[in-house]
Structure formats: structure tokens, C-alpha cells
Amino acid sequence: MHQISGTIKVIQETQHFPSGFSKREFVVTTEHEKFPQHLKFELVKEKCALLSEYQIGQQVMVSFDLRGNEFNGKYYVNLVCWQLQAQDASGKAQHSSAAETSTAELRQESNFDDDIPF
């Protein structure tokens, strides 16, 4: 799990694909480094709705996972957001937008039903 805070710069519309998959991208500008960085994150499937509560210019804390894949000999890295938190000017969380089960909770072994019949 990774976290970064910054200001929302861009919010894209949700993209729907024929396979039933959907994703929504947004850009956060970080300002804690010497040179601000514009980082593109994506929300997938039901998590696309998390972004509906936010506006361009709003301060947020983004919790995300790194995902990498290979396609036709090229390699890609995606920053997949699973939680957003609005922040006030001091950087403190105002409220949290998260799915009912976070990625950290899903990773716990006790949540897996390993009742395989063989």
C-alpha cells in the first residue's frame, strides 16, 4: 500500500468497455517535492463512484497499489487507487471514501475461504 497527498488537477469521465470493465482516471499534483509531479491514478469497476464526491482543486490523500503488466513486449505501470480522503489546508483528513472492504482487509488470510473440494 502506498499513499500520497496532493491537489486534484484533472478528473476524467468513466470509461466503459465491451467486456464489462470500467475505469475512471484522475490526476493529482504533488507539491511536497522540489518540482511538482502530476500523477495519473485510476479507479476500476465499482470504485469509479468514489471520485463523484471530489472536485478539481481539492486536497486529497490517495491510497493506491502499483500494478504492472506486459502487452506485446511493452511494460506498463498503473497506480490503482482504492481509497480517497479529503484533506483540509493543514493536510488532516476530513472524511474518507472507501469501499466497504479495503485492499488491506482483503489481503488478510483470514478473509479467504479455502474450502476447496480436493
Image (spheres, rainbow, N blue to C red):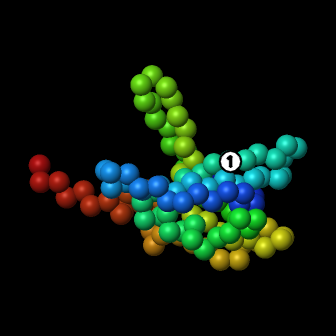
Please name the residue shown 71% across and 77% down the image: 94
**Residue 18: image location, x then y, percent:** 32, 51
Instruction: Name the image quarter holding residue 9.
Output: bottom right
Instruction: Name the image quarter holding residue 89.
Output: bottom right
Residue 34 appears left or right of 115: right
**Residue 110: image location, x then y, percent:** 36, 62
Q: How many numbered badges does the structure rendering display?
A: 1
Q: Give the residue at mark 1.
A: 39
Circle 1: residue type: Leu
Dot 1: element: strand
Residue 54 appears left or right of 31: left
Can residue 42 be seen at all in this image of the molecule?
yes
* Most distant residue in the bottom direction: 95
Residue sitting nearer the eye, 114 or 14: 14
Residue 29 appears left or right of 25: right
Residue sitting nearer the eye, 34 or 101: 34
**Residue 118: image location, x then y, percent:** 11, 49
Please name the residue shown 46% across and 55% down the image: 15
Label 1: few (<14), some (14–19) or many (≥20) C-alpha neighbours in 10 Å? some
Please name the residue shown 45% across and 68% down the image: 101
